[in-house]
Amino acid sequence: MAGWRLVWADEFQQADGSAPDPAKWVYDLGGGRWGNNESQTYTDRRANSRIESGNLIIEARKESLTDTKGVKWNYTSARLKTLGKASWTFGRMEARIKVPKGQGIWPAFWMLGTNIVTVDWPTCGEIDIMENIGREPSTVHGTIHGPGYSGGGGIGGGSTITNRVLADDFHLFAIEWEPKRIQWFLDNRPYFTVTPASLPAGKKWVFDQDQFFLINVAVGGDWPGKPDATTSFPQRMEVDYVRVYARTNASSPPGRQLPKS
């Protein structure tokens, strides 16, 4: 790709039925602590995440599961992240994904600042590269969250495809993140841009430090609402690849891939 060089990727070429590469991904586990009133619990079971035919599958299932605290959940899914494995400051971040569908289904490909472990959210900054909710099957959302502009006050935009829904096929979701500027793309078409001038007056731009990837399928939550009688399960997100590129002429480093543990 002209002007960019590949610095990290996962093409998901492991054996069918295997776990995502543990050198690149770790799991968030459990439920009820994500701040959105979601209905699922996240697991590291192969039923919820696995490799199939060169794709990462994240599968939301309707099933009863009691966690280690004795809480019973009616839905399961998976949430993967690169925290402690790889992180980046600036670059082109992209993933080719076939999203799931249905009322109450909420797939996302996003980023958080690695300093979340010390400054918490939203001071760490969040970049939502792709979010889709079941009641808007043709629309992708891109958003940033930071101190003083988080949750319902996040700054975002969307792109809607015509005469079809996103879940019908794979689409390329990407951002180009540069100093003081982030631009979102759907299938290589730009649709939204933010800069420090986009922030509410007096609020801080926090997108100049390392962030890590997250990828997940949530069920329910304040934004998408709960599943209903029209929602079928299981619902699968299929990820063909995730890639990170740096500008070939960049004077600052693209972030880093941490040593394997």
Image: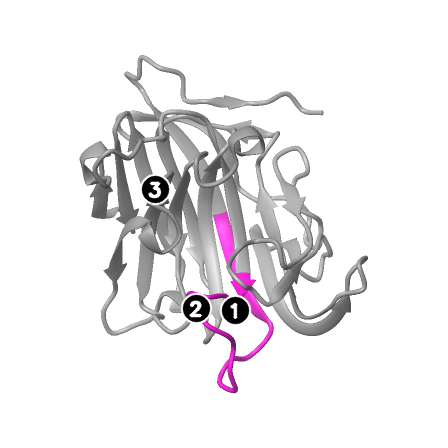
Specify which label sits upstream in the sequence, 2 or 3: 3
Q: Is residue 135 visible?
A: yes
Q: Residue furthest top?
A: 251
Q: Main secondary structure of the magenta part?
A: loop
Q: Which residues are magenta?
A: 218-240
In the image, what residue occupies the spot 52% across and 36% down? 120
44 sits to left or right of 206? right
Q: Which residue is mark 3?
A: 148
* Amino acid type, residue under disc 3 in the picture: Gly
Q: Locate the N terminus and report the quarter of the image it occupies.
A: top left
* Amino acid type, residue under disc 1 in the picture: Gly
Q: Position of residue 96 (x, y in %)?
A: 42, 50
Q: Residue furthest left?
A: 197
* Amino acid type, residue under disc 2 in the picture: Pro
Q: Secondary structure at mark 3?
A: loop
Q: Position of residue 211 (x, y in %)?
A: 46, 32
Q: Which residue is mark 2?
A: 224
Q: Which residue is mark 1?
A: 220
**Vertical side of 112 occupied by 50: above or below:** below
